[in-house]
Amino acid sequence: MDKIIKITAGIFIVVFAAFTGFMTYTAYTETAYRNTLTGTYTYTCTITMDSPLYNVTLFIPVPVDPEGNSPVMAAFSSHSVTGVPAGWETTLFDTGKSTLVKVVTPAIIPPQGTSAQHPYTVTLSSETTLHTPIDTRNPVGKSAMFRPVQALNGNGAYTTSLYADYTTSPDNVVMVTSSVTGNNTWNIFEPRSNEYHTGISVLIKGENHGWVVLAGHLESGIGTYDVPAGS
C-alpha cells in the first residue's frame, strides 16, 4: 500500500512539475511576444524620367486597408514624407474604393546630365511603426494594399489604376513605381519575423492625359508564424 502511495505521489509530482513548467513557458513566451512585437509598414514611391514634365497632376494610389486606414496618411497630412521636392503640393483623396495622393507641380526639371541611360528619379518614402501585429498572410482582406485590387490571380499578379496628366517630349519614358511592405518582428529566445510585400508599376511614353493601368504583384505569408496561441 505504501508503495502504491509513493508511486502515485511520484507521478503527481512529475505531472505537477510538467504542468508548472508548461505554464511558466507559456507565460514567458506570451509576455516576450507582446513586449517585443513590432509591426512596421515601409512605403516608397518613385517617379523616374529622362526629360522635363510640365503642368503635372498625378493621382497615385497609396496603401490602405479595407476600413480605409492608411499607414502613410499621417505622414502625408503632416508633410513629413521623405523626399517630396520643394514646390510639390500633395493632398490625400479618398474615393471610397481607393486612397490616392494628388501631386501637383508646375514642372519637374531633371538636372543636367540626365538621359535615358541615366534617368532622374524622385523617391518618396515613409515608415510607420505599430505595436500590434500586421496581418501578413491575408493583406488583401485585412492590411494595407494599393486598392482597388483588381484581377488578382494565384500568382499574386493584379492591376489597379493611376491618373497622370502632363506634357513632355514624345520620347520621354516616365516610370512610376510604388511599394509597401508589412513586417512583424518579435523575439522569443531568438529574433523572428514575417511579412508581405506588394508593389505596383507602369511605364508611360510621351505625354499623358488620363488614367493608366498599373501592374501589381503581391507576395504574402513570408517568414515564420510560430507565435503563442491566441496572440
Image (tube, rainbow, N blue to C red):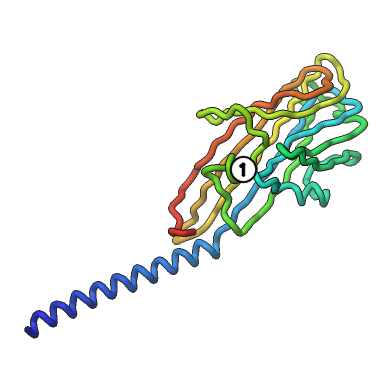
Q: Nearer the viewer, residue 9 or 25?
A: 9
Indicate the position of residue 226 as horizontal and vertical percent values: 43, 53
Tell me which corner region of the image, top left, top right, bottom left or bottom right, holds residue 142.
top right
Placement of 48 over or under 116, stated as above or below? below
Locate residue 105 relative to residue 23 in the image: left or right.
Answer: right
Placement of 91 over or under 115, stated as above or below? below
Locate residue 124 relative to residue 108 in the image: left or right.
Answer: left
Q: Nearer the viewer, residue 73 or 21?
A: 73
Tell me which corner region of the image, top left, top right, bottom left or bottom right, holds residue 49.
top right
Q: Nearer the viewer, residue 64 or 128?
A: 64
| Residue type pointed to by label 1 | Thr
Q: Secondary structure at mark 1?
A: strand
Indicate the position of residue 100 as horizontal and vertical percent values: 76, 38
Which residue shows up at 84% across the image and 42% down it? 91
Q: Residue furthest top?
A: 170
Which residue shows up at 73% across the image and 36% down it? 61
Placement of 85 over or under 38, stated as above or below? above
Q: Dot 1 corresponds to which residue? A: 181
